[in-house]
Image: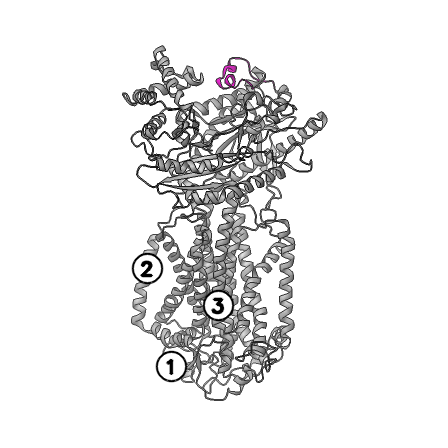
Amino acid sequence: MSDYDGVNGGTELVPVETGLNLDPDDDDDSAPKGRSSRSEQYPPSFFTDEKGNLKFVNLVVRRPCSVFFGILILCFIMTFLLVSVVFSAGNPFTDPGNEYDINDIRSIDYDSLKLARDKVEDDRKAWEISLAEASGIPQLVRPQQEVLDITYWVFEGETDAGVFGSAESLRGMREALTLFTEDADYQDFCWKRYSQEQEQDNGFAASNSTNSTGECDLPLSALNIYYTSFWDVDIAQSVIDTLMMDFPANVIRYNAVALCVEFNTLCEEVPPQYNTTEDFAWALALNAEISSLTNEWDGKGPLQEPFLDQISLFCAYMQQLITKKGLMDFGFDKEFSIDNPVSKYSRAILTWGGPLALTDTNTEPDDLTDEEKDEGDEEALKDYIVDNFLSRMNKIASSKHNPEVNSYYFMGALILEVLLDVVRQDALLALASFLFVFIYLRIMVGSWFLACIGMTEILFSVPVSWFIYNTIFRVKYFAFLNTLTLFIVAAIGADDIFIFMDAYKLSGQSKDPEILESLESRMSWVYRRTGFAMAITSATTCSAFLCTLITPLAGVQAFGIFAATVILIDYVLVMTLFCTAVVIYHNKYERPGCCSSCSAGCSTIDPSSTQEAFAKVDKDDDFKLDRISTFFRTKMSPFINTPLNRLFLGIAFLLWLVIAVIYALRITPTKEEEQFLSEDHPLQKSITILNRAFPIVEDDEGLNIHFIWGLNKVSRKGVSPLTDPEFFGNPKFLDTFEFNEVCQTEMLQVCTDLKQNDLYVPYIKQAGGLGAVSCFIEELAAYNVLGSLDDCMSVLSGEWKNEVWQIPEADIPAMMQSFIYERSCYSEEGSSIMEQYKDNLGFDGTAMRFAGLSVESSVIDPFSTLPEKTVREQYDKMIEISKKIDNVMIDACGGKTLMTDLDTKFVFMNNQRIYTRSALTSSILGVCIAFTVLLVSTRVFHIAFFATLSIICVLVSVTGSMVIIGWDLGSIEAILISIVAGFSVDYVVHLAHSYVQSSGNTAERITQAFGEMGISVLNGMVTSVGASIPLFFCQLQFFKKFGTFLCLTIAFSWLFANFGFMSVLAQLKIPIKKKGAEAKNAGTNYSDSDGVSDEQGNGEYSNDNEYDA
């Protein structure tokens, strides 16, 4: 059968002598004589002609090129329209921050504040513009006074002495900072501080503020201490000896009076035993000694190499003082202490400022929005960094640069570049996956033409599905998760191609003249045989993916819908485009050596392979199979049919399942932050060190948690995240909200309590011995008393509290119109009141719409993704605090407290719980759907039951393996578990369907099922596993974990389908009875009871009609 060299991938065909009739049609002389003809079995209908052939197949056979190019053109048109509609708008991916349960209280509170804040800000900007136009004076902003970006360096010591234990280590860290600060153009990009005199401008005054140059802020680093301009050994030792004496007695003594001595605040809170003249004098003297050293920590001196150990010990003692520890905590890790004055890690921050004077913001065109101006500054800063420093930054960050310290960096402007580089590298690995699929397709189908068309239909299934998903289903939410469908369809699409080609190969070896009388009849047989089997697997897989709709998260729902659409379109393209390609292959390229239809003698093959096969119908040629199919018939089938082998398999599977169940039950939600990149990637390593090695300290940005009054719950009317991912509802303001004197008084009392109450210390970040609480009411009250905020010492000391500071509600709008442009005394950046309190001060230019305060969390920061349990503990405490506040604020301000954050940490906390719950519910539902589809398709209960049991075993095995390899249940793992059923169904369904459609006793059915589907299932497994291997090396954790998951799922699916499912059938030998039309078509009332032949010796039951059923 040389004509089939291409079909079988060049695999040699060998005769099979098994004692069984292995012809797929089983149409020999011993077959029942009453079997109906094909035209009788398939009477004429809308889909079938008078010969029983499919009309669509007739069209394909008669006009293959027209159909082929018509489908291709249609795919190209849909792809072009997709690009025009979707990609023309820019980034097609939906912001992942938009993914949450819109009906959960966390997301409702989040949107209630966020949308209200945005609405108030828009109204206030409109008021400011009208005011500026009326006055003719533009708003001016000093160059580089606002934070534009930061460069973060993280240092890791390589010796026991830590990062501050040697001069070489210190010089290595210093190099990372002076790289920037000694550059000639650094002054044009650094973040600048302006003197108090330069900050006397209310935002509208056309003073000379823009002419003041300011000074670049020092890098925030412990290196400023070791490179101090002044270090007095005797003063330092005196301070150490004083605090060491009767430790910790003197530390407690100083802390008791520190706030009063240093800031003239909370003097009334000093404990009586320390409220003496002697204690205050002692503390004042000690503070003077300490300040004489700390005031010189400017990083501009030489390295104090002889005193490194003394400096480290001095800093360790400073950590014990509540007003000094903020100077130390940032640069030293959490293990640094008096007993261990060694820090393995350190960190440093360089701050970049904007707006940049390189593009004069005062003369820019009026049509540029603030966002466009910011983007221009960010691009200019990025170009400055990339052009001047990036190569040297990478050199410093290399592992071999300094033997005593490793340096890692990240920066907002560079993160996108780093991630794009990672994506580019991972994309090459993804291409390797597709290249493997293509090469394997070429080997197995034996034709470059079919391999190319196969990959074309696989790749086209994604944009075609995207077009349908976007324009027909009207789903606009496109999650990053949807990119996984490329790998899903590569695996499933290749599997469908193998099924189709193996059926085409078998059809050419048929002994039924009705099948081979024409290409129409042959392809109709192939179409019916494969169409139903692939429809079962596609329907089951689609249904499993659609199980994600039970989750309330739009991103997961969108992935399920898109993945199901891709699987459906892939099935349609296999049955149309690839089917047509097979007809062209049959007509033009099947003969070996025919590479082009234009080659001599290759325009049309004559005789065709179908004609040659028809001519051999009556000949007694041995039935030949390729070596792989032969292996499954002659080796695999006898192995499964041997009882002793099944015993060993059963024991092995049972032992593994016990282990898998034990480990699967141990899976727990992740207790650490989820990683985005591989843990050995420098960016991920720096983030990991920051999260694990350092506490949240004064100079760190903690999560701002807001307590707001004046807002009602957001209106969700008309909200549909899938169809409109940018609309979250409309804000609602409380009509009962009153910002009167009583409300102001109680707000200040709440602020004071949150700052001073020791019960809140574990939850609220401490700064200078007080809770980090942001209250605009404090500065508003001081402004009302003092007339301005110029004297920040008076503002911070609280002297104004001795006056009547409350403001009548009627006077609030007029006062706010000037107050919001004052410079905040609590802002290190010199920000205005409005900028400092933009999330809590709801003034729209004419009225106060809402008011509030915020606290900084001591545990959560805005950047890390912490475990759900950790965040929930903080959330529950904040809810408890808000309920306590409500006891007084409901009556005082006319509404309940709304508590939320604006960095979606509480929202994501709920998402994490949804992930873990939906993993279980989606997987269970997927298994139930798989059982239903199997039962409907096979109509044999025990087959559906055992096949479903195989899927459950795969689910347990994959989950157990995840735990064994060290995975916790994070968001990625939960999503993957929820789609296990969809991935694991294919192989067992193909074998189950083939087993049911086979004839004879159980052993014969198993042999026929293995012989017919073994090679297809094996090819699908090899393709999927091979495609997953390159993903193991991805830097993006999502793709890396997906590759591992895909490999595990496919491998376990193949093992349980071939060795588990088939062994159970062989062991139980439950008969399959043919009834009704099947029995009538077969001319017998057949039951495959083992050991009993049909019709008492009439021979094997013909299987031809059953495949077509």
Position of residue 753 measured from the top left corner of the image (x, y, whole percent): 45, 23
Mark 1 vs 2, N-terminal side = 1
In the image, farthest residue toward the left? 246
Q: Is residue 1006 left or right of residue 471?
A: left
The amino acid type found where label 2 is placed reads Trp
Q: Within 10 angstroms of label 3, few (less than 14), some, or many (20 or more) residues?
A: some
Q: Nearer the viewer, residue 167 or 534?
A: 167
Image: magenta residue range: 789-808
Mark 1 to mark 3 CA distance (whole Å): 33 Å
Mark 1 vs 3, N-terminal side = 1
The amino acid type found where label 1 is placed reads Thr
User: Residue tagged by mark 3?
Assistant: 439
Mark 1 to mark 2 CA distance (whole Å): 34 Å
On screen, residue 588 above or below 396 = below
Residue 5 on the magenta segment: no
Report the residue at 43% width, 66% height from top.
1022
Q: Nearer the viewer, residue 1007 or 813?
A: 813
The disc placed on residue 18 is 1
User: Residue tagged by mark 2?
Assistant: 656
How many numbered dots are placed on residues in this image?
Answer: 3
The answer to whether the residues at label 1 and label 3 have Cβ atoms under 8 Å apart is: no
The disc placed on residue 958 is none
Q: Is residue 675 left or right of residue 190?
A: left
Q: Which type of secondary structure does the marked residue at label 3 adopt?
A: helix
Mark 3 vs 2, N-terminal side = 3
Mark 3 to mark 2 CA distance (whole Å): 34 Å
Position of residue 178 measured from the top left corner of the image (x, y, whole percent): 46, 35
The answer to whether the residues at label 1 and label 2 have Cβ atoms under 8 Å apart is: no
Q: Nearer the viewer, residue 878 or 480?
A: 480
In the image, farthest residue toward the bottom? 619
